[in-house]
Every structure is written in structure tokens, then in C-alpha cells.
Image (tube, rainbow, N blue to C red):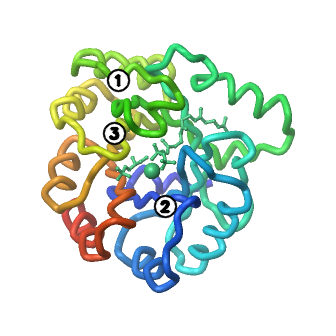
Amino acid sequence: MHANWKTWAHVTKLDPDKRLPKGVVEEIATSGTDALMLSGTLNVTRENLHELLDLVSSYGVPLVVEPASPDCAIFDRGIDHLFVPSVLNTNDVRWVVGKHYAWLRHTSSIDWDMVVPEAYIVLNPNSAVGRVTGADCSLSPGDVAAFAEVADRYFRFPIVYIEYSGTYGDPAIVQAASEAVEHATLYYGGGIRSAEQAAEMGRYADTIVVGNAVYEEGIDVLRATVRAVQ
Ligand SMILES: CC(C)=CCC/C(C)=C/CC/C(C)=C/CC/C(C)=C/COP(=O)(O)OP(=O)(O)O
Ligand SMILES: O=P(O)(O)OC[C@@H](O)CO
Ligand SMILES: [Mg+2]
């Protein structure tokens, strides 16, 4: 399986739990974003995931599914990759390796060439992902750098993901992570709603992710964030 994902600068995250008119879906898919990632923490089911995949699959833009649970780990319907998170900054081992164990325990049909592991560092305690995983979000730049380095150099995760879902993060934190990571691709996601914010986080992150803005702002905001990093 190709590894073009390493060259993506801009990813748009779509939530199967939310609805978009078909025309808007087309505008997003043709906005210049490098890939669509289908993902959410709450209320994502195989059914709404399949529905969203059917809506986005005809535009030729790369498609990633990022499951929050094993039942949404799928390999068919035209997807290019399955990005599987592990949250590093939680003491609840289920979100580090437990769900993964359960996944392998109950299936024998994993297409490993499609799987890309992600080391999440979750930093917004009020986000769904922060609450669900019980992440310790009170981290300094040095703490985040240490998590990023252990993810990159020890566990050799191909992706380190600084996640502020729902709120714009601290650029100094993302800078610290970027200085700590040698090989992994650094993702930043959270609260990006303008070209300026996209450019600011894009200075440190290899790939920026825009999610909620697609639902709450117009297509022009998405296009501006694309232009800012490409
Ligand atoms: C082993 C498998 C296949 C799955 C488990 C994967 C794990 C450990 C997930 C834990 C972290 C998690 C829930 C990731 C989901 C991706 C993500 C962070 C989505 C953004 O979620 P939010 O934006 O906070 O939630 P909503 O959009 O649903 O409100
Ligand atoms: O929805 P926003 O706040 O843009 O965050 C993007 C993404 O990192 C969420 O997982
Ligand atoms: Mg979300």
C-alpha cells in the first residue's frame, strides 16, 4: 500500500455523526484538502460510517477511517488507510492498547498494509476524546516533548498527533513536539478556523487537521486553511 499520506499537509476530518448537504460534501472533497478522515469519538456506528463513505467515495480524494472502537475498523468501501489511535497521556490502558487487544482477539481479517498507528497526545479536557479517555491534559511543553519523543523514538509510531479537538491549542506546545520528533509525521488538530491559525500550526506540524470548522463556518474558511499550508 502506498505511503502518500506522509506528504499530506491538510486533512479534513468529517464526523459520521453529523450531516452535510451533498453539495457541501462535493465542495469539501474538491477544496484542495489532501485527504478526508472519517472520525469522531461519540455516536459513530458502522451504519453512519458507511453512509458517509458512500457520500464521499466518488471524488478521488484519499479516504481514511479513524475508528474510535474496533467495530468501526473497516477495510472496504474504497478507503485507502485505517488510522488507529492510541492515547499516550492517559492512565487508562484501554485507550493505549486494550481496545487493540480486543480488536485482534475478535477478528482475523486485518489488512495490516492499510493500518497506520497514531500516537495521540490529547490536550483539551473538555473534548469528547479528552473526557472519554480520561487524558491528563495539564501538560507542559516539556511533558509533551517527552511523550512525543517516546512515541517517535521508542514505540516508533509513524504519526504523533497533538489533539486539541474543539479548541485552538498552544503553538509553543506544538513547537516543542516538532522539535522532539525525528521520524514521525506530526499532526496538529483543534480549533483551526482561519488561514492565520492554519499557517501558525502548519509551521510546526507536518499535517494540520480541520474538523468542526467545516460544519460551523463556510467552505471559504476551509479553502483558506488549505491555501495557507500548501
Ligand atoms: C483498536 C481500535 C480499532 C480502536 C480504538 C482506538 C482508540 C484507542 C481510540 C481512543 C481515542 C479516540 C476516541 C479517538 C477517536 C478519534 C478522535 C480523537 C476523534 C475526535 O473526537 P472528538 O471531536 O473529541 O469527538 P466528537 O466529534 O465525537 O464530539
Ligand atoms: O474539530 P477540530 O476542533 O477542528 O479538531 C480537528 C481534529 O483534531 C479533531 O479530532
Ligand atoms: Mg469532533
Per the model, the C-alpha gap separating discs 2 and 3 is 16 Å
Quarter of the image containing the C terminus?
Answer: bottom left
Residue at x 40%, y 58% (from the top left corner): 11
**Circle 2: element type:** strand
Q: Name the residue that disc number 1 marks.
A: 137
Would you say 166 lies left or right of 57 here? left
Report if the beta carbon of the residue with label 1 is closer than 8 angstroms to ligand 1: no
Q: Earlier in the sequence, mark 1 or mark 2?
A: 2
Q: Give the amino acid type for the residue marked by disc 3 in the picture.
A: Tyr
Q: Give the amino acid type for the residue marked by disc 1 in the picture.
A: Cys
Residue at x 79%, y 32% (from the top left corner): 104
Q: Earlier in the sequence, mark 2 or mark 3?
A: 2
In the rendering, at what x and y percent does residue 210 appear? 35, 57
In the image, residue 148 above or below residue 44: above
In the rendering, at what x and y percent does residue 85 appear? 55, 36
For disc 2, the neighbor class at 10 Å (few under 14, some 14 to 19, many from 20) is many
Circle number at residue 164: 3
Circle number at residue 14: 2
